[in-house]
Image (cartoon, rainbow, N blue to C red):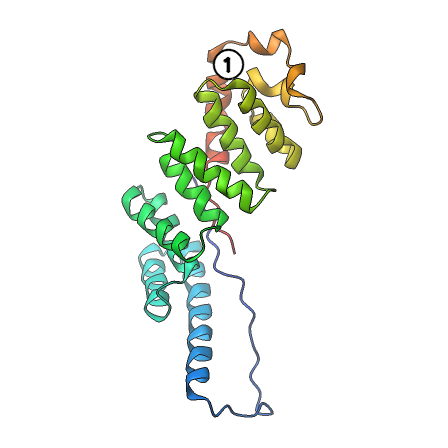
Amino acid sequence: MGAGAALTLAAGAVVWAVMTHSNPPSNDAAFDNVNNNRLKTDALLESGLLQARYQDIPNAKATFKRVLTLDPKNKLAWYNLGVLAQNEGHRADAHKAYDAALKTDPSYTSALFNKALLLKTDDPDGALKLLRRAVAADPKAATAYFHIGETLARKGRDEQARDAYRQAVELNSSLRSQVPSSYRESVAPGRSSNESTEADESTEDAANSEADESTEDALNSETPDR
């Protein structure tokens, strides 16, 4: 899911507490302060999400930065800042933001995935490590498996690429049409790697490039999680 594709931002899943007068007041000022900060950060995350959805990007950035003044380790604020930076082509800023999110949660799948996309062209080995961490954290991350397959294919590691593409398709059958044509038949759900046909192997590179280009935007869409 590369830079320039349409992004869908999402703030953290928020559980709104309805405060009523029947609730006894707390005498613990520190607890109240933490509670109030949490409510503020939740509200700001939702506000930043709405601003981003309506393409009010400068204010969305400002809102997510306000979250960080209240909670400097908030992985969702860092992550969404990374998505906005990546969408604008500011790779260094995106990298920094994803690193900050991962410092708080090293298994944060979406940040691992998006950081991998930043590295995929210039550092494919680094991207593979991140993508493998992503699928270790979320074994159902179909698109991460797809990008593992794509990266391995570019490195000429065909059998491993087929295995990764197959896992992607088994998790999400709609991805099969986006697998390069030279791998497509061999990654049908339930088909083993040694069943690839001569026809698959003889498919021209030009056909692969056309298939890749026709689906790039859909696959490269960074999708911030809730």
Residue that appears at 32% across and 63% down: 65
Regarding residue 169, the answer to whether it shows in the image is: yes
Q: Label 1, on which residue?
A: 207
Q: Is residue 79 above or below residue 139?
A: below
User: Residue 91, how many percent across, how many down?
Assistant: 30, 42
Q: Residue at x 31, y 57 (%)?
A: 58
Residue in the image at 44% along x and 51% along y: 106
Residue 4, can we see it?
no
Q: Position of residue 93 (x, y in %)?
A: 29, 48
**Residue 106 to residue 201: above or below:** below
Q: Nearer the viewer, residue 25 or 222?
A: 25
In the rendered view, tell whether residue 138 sits above or below residue 128.
Answer: below
Q: Residue furthest right?
A: 190
Q: Secondary structure at mark 1?
A: helix
- x and y, in percent, of residue 135 in the image: 54, 41
Could you tell me how many numbered marks the image carries? 1
Q: What amino acid is found at the position of numbered circle 1 in the picture? A: Ala
Q: Residues within 10 Å of mark 1 (few under 14, many from 20)?
A: few
Examine the image and state in which quarter residue 120 appears.
Answer: top left
**Residue 142 place in picture, x, y as percent:** 58, 38
Nearer to the camera, 120 or 1: 120
Residue drawn at point x = 49 percent, y = 19 percent: 157
Q: Is residue 158 left or right of residue 102?
A: right
Observer-nearest residue: 26 or 157? Answer: 157
